[in-house]
Image (cartoon, grey):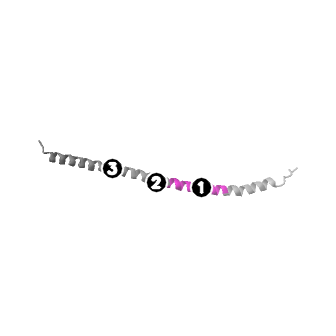
Amino acid sequence: MFPTKTVRSLGVATVVAMGLASCATYDDDFARVNSRLDQLETRVQDAATSADAANQAAQRANSRLDQLEGRVQAIESAPGRVPRG
């Protein structure tokens, strides 16, 4: 039989080896999570850019509507025309 000290040393070595091997898989997991976070960050930035562009377009449209509203009110308040003969 193996001496107790040798068995204990092999057991400790096995546990350490298994622990180190399991840490290696976390690196892959962290890399996947970081990659996914990078993709999400890019999507958020793209969405923010699109939202800013839409906001600017809406402001331009509101400005044009305000200009048209003055013209419409002027036409509506003008005296009626008398039909020709």
Q: Amino acid at mark 1?
A: Asn
Q: Amino acid at mark 2?
A: Glu
**Residue 57 on the magenta segment:** yes
The quadrant of the rendering that contains the N terminus is: top left
**Which residue position holds label 2?**
41
Side of 68 where 21 appears, left or right: left
Side of 66 where 81 appears, left or right: right
Badge 3: residue crowd in 10 Å (few <14, some 14–19, many ≥20): few
> Residue 18, how many percent across, how many down?
25, 47
Q: Nearer the viewer, mark 3 or mark 2?
A: 3
Which circle marks residue 26 in the picture? 3
Q: Secondary structure at mark 3?
A: helix
Badge 1: residue crowd in 10 Å (few <14, some 14–19, many ≥20): few
Gap in Å between the C-alphas at discs 3 and 2? 22 Å
Residue nearest the observer in this picture, 43 or 20:
20
Nearer the N terminus, badge 1 or badge 2?
2
**Which residue position holds label 1?**
55
> Residue 14, how many percent across, how many down?
22, 46
Q: Residue at x 18, y 48 (%)?
A: 9
Q: Secondary structure at mark 1?
A: helix
Residue nearest the observer in this picture, 38 or 66:
38
Residue nearest the observer in this picture, 39 or 76:
39
Residue interval drawn in magenta? 45-62
